[in-house]
Image (tube, rainbow, N blue to C red):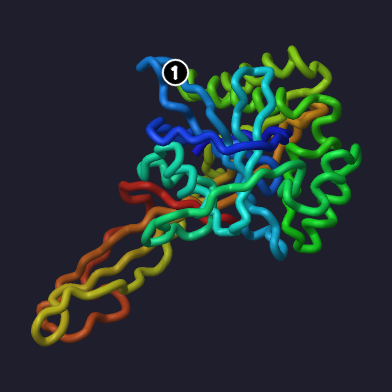
Amino acid sequence: MRYLALILAVALCVTPKVATAQMSVSATQIHLGDWILTPILAAPAPPGALAHVHSFLALLDKDTVTGNNITSIWYIRGADDNSAWQAMAWDSQNQWDAIYRLKLDLGIGDEWDSRWATKDPKPGTPPASPPSPVEYIKGVFTTDPLAGMIALMVDRDELVEILVNLGYKAADVPLEKALVVGECQDRYVLTSFAKTIEGVEASATSSVADGVAAGHAYLATKCAAICFPYVTVGPWVPTFPITWTPAPWVFIFCTPTVGGCSSCNYTAEVCRGVTRTWTFTWPNCSVSTYIDNAFECWTQSLLCLNPAGGGCPAAPACAAPPLGAPPPGTPTYINN
């Protein structure tokens, strides 16, 4: 998954449906504090045309939810680059309700399910009739008694933050904060997000830098005082000196047969320390870095025949290969 970290947005109104559009989901996500915006791409027309962002589904990190907070918001692009974006949200806190509603309405296939930025477990059976979203504005549903007042407040940020912390049915999204976006209109910032995603999709190497350049170029024509914020994540790099650390063999399962086990299966992990660098560019154009430490681990498998039958010993009884280097396969990463 590719990542960006950016800022801003708002809107309201009706839910457009494109039942046969066969849309897709981008692999590039926009991170906004505790929220992640997943871009939904319209079906190219004609075939071979460049990707076009239709909308964003913003999902709150469920580990940060308090009480009845809103956790799923849909930002829908207008007719052109200068149009307002609509915003809809779900009363349900199960983010798969929102995902399945969009999959149904927009013709998004199951093959994109891994790209939705939710921690909620995927239901074993899709809901027959997932709930529809309702109109949303500046942190609350338009039907909320506070909606009219919040929509008119110049300094609504503090009130919405308090409501969210109290567990109220509200959402504190960084892209809706005047403190973040200043005087730049939300429609331009959201469109710059869309331009960024389209730039990544159009890049021959799926370059985040190409996307950010496209988004920033558009934003500069509308809100020159704001620097386009984003984060880039470097590759995992081994910590020097490189030291492979094997863990003990662990019994996993036996191959059963009459009288016990005909063979015994074990695994062991081989790990090394790694780091990667996160580089943050902020709205004021300052740059900071963060070093992420972890262990990169491979799993080695071992099968021992057990001709005598009976149970398997806790440790391998057959000759085990040396564990000084990783076996083939894809490593896993464990945070330090």
**Residue drawn 63% across the image and 42% down it:** 88
Q: In terms of depth relative to the viewer, which is nearer, 214 or 79?
A: 79
Q: Which residue is mark 1?
A: 204
> Vertical placement of 42 versus 34: above or below?
above
Q: Is residue 292 visible?
A: no
Q: In terms of depth relative to the viewer, which is nearer, 253 or 18?
A: 18
* 288 left or right of 21 in image: right
Q: Is residue 165 visible?
A: yes
Q: Position of residue 105 (x, y in %)?
A: 45, 40
Q: Amino acid at mark 1?
A: Ala
Q: Judge the density around disc 1: few (<14), some (14-19), many (≥20) Cα neighbours within 10 Å.
A: few
Which quadrant of the structure image shows residue 165? bottom right
* 56 left or right of 160 in image: left
**Quarter of the rendering occupied by the C terminus:** bottom right
Which quadrant of the structure image shows residue 193? top right
**Residue drawn 59% across the image and 58% down it:** 92
**Residue drawn 21% across the image and 73% down it:** 264
* 51 left or right of 305 in image: right
Q: In terms of depth relative to the viewer, which is nearer, 197 or 265?
A: 197
Which quadrant of the structure image shows residue 22? top left
